[in-house]
Image: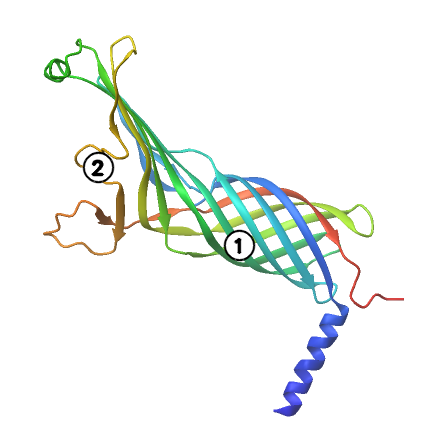
Amino acid sequence: MKHLITLCTAVLISSLSYGQWQVSASSGYALGSATMKLGERINISETENSYGSYGEGTNVQLRGTYFFDDSFGVDLSVGYLQGTNQDVSIIDLPSTEVNAVARARAFGASASVVYKFTNNIYGRFGALLKLGGKTEGVIYQKSVFSEAEAEAFGVPVGSYSETNYKEDFHGHFPLGFVGALGYKYDLDSHFSIFAEAEYYGISLKRKDSEISAFNTDVKLPDGTVAVSGLYTLDNLPEGINRTTTYVDNLSNSNTDTSKELSQKVPYSSFGLNIGITYKFERLNKEQ
């Protein structure tokens, strides 16, 4: 056992003495991959499924890499995803308009193994985590009153309610896969630029959600506000819960509308990143 410990220590010291640190910063855009049905688009003539992934959008990353030798290294990165709008419910009917979209606002991290195929071409693969953030739902709804409803509000026929609200969805911490293939070009002994194709394979299981903003106004046919703040965050309409918890099992006799069955939502993507790297001197610089 002592010999094994001595050998491992010698290998570790040898690797560290040869090793080299580098840091990188990059930004890029990713398209959704392994998309799933997120909602529907409905008009007077048809209903269409809406597919997508919340992984689509712009990202920024900071990365630290340590190379044990000229080929092998390990990489730790943190990043932020500014997701693009994904259609959840789009309704265009004579008496109802709905525009409900959702987008990612997420922080993540990854730990990867890096391998240099040549001095310019490299690959990396490893584990991906979502550290925090949310899937933000932004909803607009316009509902034209029936004659009875208009009479009850004391407004002319053609008046309508207009609702805007936001709902933040949170999930359990997931574990996914990240892989990339890149090309770097050395500017000098310290700086280089790179471009890489990167794949994220990950999905998120919903945990809970909370409405963060809510407002309903009553408007006349010409758009003039007749009643401001009919419903607000502190006065939600019946049937709308401020918070919702997502669970794996629900009793058939459940009457608690604040609980719903959970679901997995996609965050997978395939994108292109461009960035810059600064390479430190080797710990044991060759003379």
Is 43 placed left or right of 61 in the picture?
left
> Residue 279's x, y, as percent?
75, 54
**Residue 22 picture location, percent across and down:** 71, 56
Q: Name the amino acid type tagged 1.
A: Ala
Left or right of 62: which side holds 137?
left
Of residues 212 and 209, which is closer to you in this image?
212
- Name which residue type carries label 2: Ile
Residue 276: quadrant of the picture: top right
Give coordinates of residue 274: x percent, y percent. Answer: 65, 42
- Residue mark closest to the camera, 2 vs 1: 2
**Residue to which mark 1 is pinned:** 109
In this figure, which residue is indicated by the disc labeled 2? 240
Give the percent coordinates (x, y) of residue 261: 24, 50
Q: Which residue is drawn at 80% across and 60% down?
A: 281
Compared to 118, does 219 lie above or below?
A: above
Marks 2 and 1 close (CB-CB < 8 Å): no
Q: Quadrant of the C terminus?
A: bottom right
In this view, the residue in front, 118 or 218, is: 218
Considering every residue shown, the one lying at the far front of the view is 234
